[in-house]
Image (cartoon, rainbow, N blue to C red):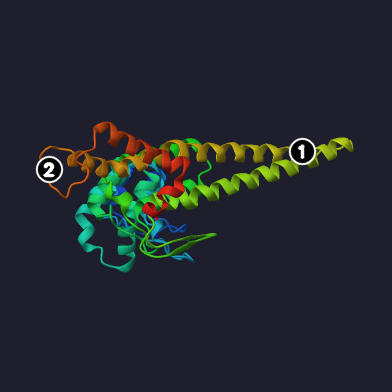
Amino acid sequence: MGTNDTLLAAAIKEHNSAEITRLAGVVANIDSQTKKRCTALYTAVECNNIEAVVILLERGASMNIIPKKRTYQDASECPIMFALKMGASHEEMQLLFLDKLASVRGTWSSNKDQEILETIAHSAMLYSTPLVFFRATAESRGEDIYDKRGLNALMTTLRQVVLFANDATKCASTLENVLQIVNKYPAMAWECLKNDEECGMLVHTKGSTALGMLVYQFIPVREIKNRQFQAISEALFETHKMLETGGSMSDSLVQHQKMNQTDIKTNSKVVLYVVDEFVPALWTIMLRPFRIALAMGTHNRLGSGEACVVNCLHTDTIDIIFRNLILDITIAPQLVQHILC
């Protein structure tokens, strides 16, 4: 790495557009990596320097370079994937990358390139905004792409958010975005897991939908976790009482009690939102085509055939049917398990 490369990295961090423009034109290799194994484009993403990204992409900087000398060569470390993982605050930058991808996609032919293309839509849904996801699916054809584990973008997002979210507000925000996306691509919600897949203590069964995995696996695991937090809280409380009786107290014990109570509250908020709001909303979107089909069957002309057995239904009856189905997913989920798994 030469002097100009070092100066370019410094200019990017300082948001010095004039120096970035000058240095980007004179460096020997626009994709040279620093001692920390970062290209100039990677540094621009890290600093959220949109002007630098524009300049570097115009100079031919590569979006798909994976940092060298890493023990584990992870495609998610390349600039375009790193930008997606930075979240909604990097939306403008992410769209710049996706626009560039449209012009270079044909040159991405290696196995690593294919791995990146297969996960762009997954990362866009998990980390960014619906707008970025819609653009990502247009450039990577990712609305129906499965990863190597047999999961589509919806399955990946629901698993990551519902099993591991530790911020209830952020969880709700991500899942609201998911609803917008599924509203545009409802068929995604009916796609099935391609093969059995182990995930820690869970085994996802081939044929399950994303909602099936959520209701019958992810939520129960989260509820088990909360019971464990509650048991720990009770044990800490008993220990606290014993120490108080003995005339001694532990600051660390008090801190652990507070942290555990925070975990319980966060976990409860996540489960409450997912069960009471997200699951019924997603199920409603999934049922919409069936509701339309039933309504069409009651039409004088469309439902007049002898084989049509629903032409006698009234709008009120159809409303009752679907209202009960929505209730079933939350109060008696076992009744619809055969549909979703």
Q: Amino acid at mark 1?
A: Asp
**Dot 2: what SS?**
loop
Q: Which numbered marker is on residue 171?
A: none
> Few, some or many C-alpha atoms within 10 Å of disc 1 (few <14, some 14-19, many ≥20)?
few
Badge 1 marks a residue whose secondary structure is helix
Q: Residue furthest top?
A: 316
Name the image quarter holding the C terminus.
bottom left
Mark drawn on residue 304: 2
Residue 235 horizontal/vertical position (percent): 74, 44
The residue at 47%/64% (across/down) is 70
Q: Is residue 324 above or below residue 37?
A: above
Percent x, y of residue 180: 31, 39
Front residue (pair 127, 293) = 293
**Label located before the other in sequence (1 or 2):** 1
Query: Are the residues at dot 1 and dot 2 in contact (C-beta closer than 8 Å)?
Result: no
136 or 312, nearer to the observer: 312
Q: Residue at x 66, y 41 (%)?
A: 260
- Residue that numbered label 1 is attached to: 251
Amino acid marked by disc 2:
Ser
Residue 37 visible in this rendered orientation of the protein: yes
100 or 266: which is nearer to us? 266
| Image depth: mark 1 or mark 2 in front | 2
Residue 184 visible somewhere in the drawing: no
Residue 272 x, y percent position in the rendering? 50, 37
In 3D space, how far apart are the residues under numbered discs 1 and 2 (Cα atoms)?
Answer: 76 Å
Residue depicted at 39% across the width and 47% down the height:
126
Foreground pick, 43 / 99: 99
Instruction: Judge left or right: residue 93 versus residue 335.
Output: left
Residue lying furthest left in this view?
301
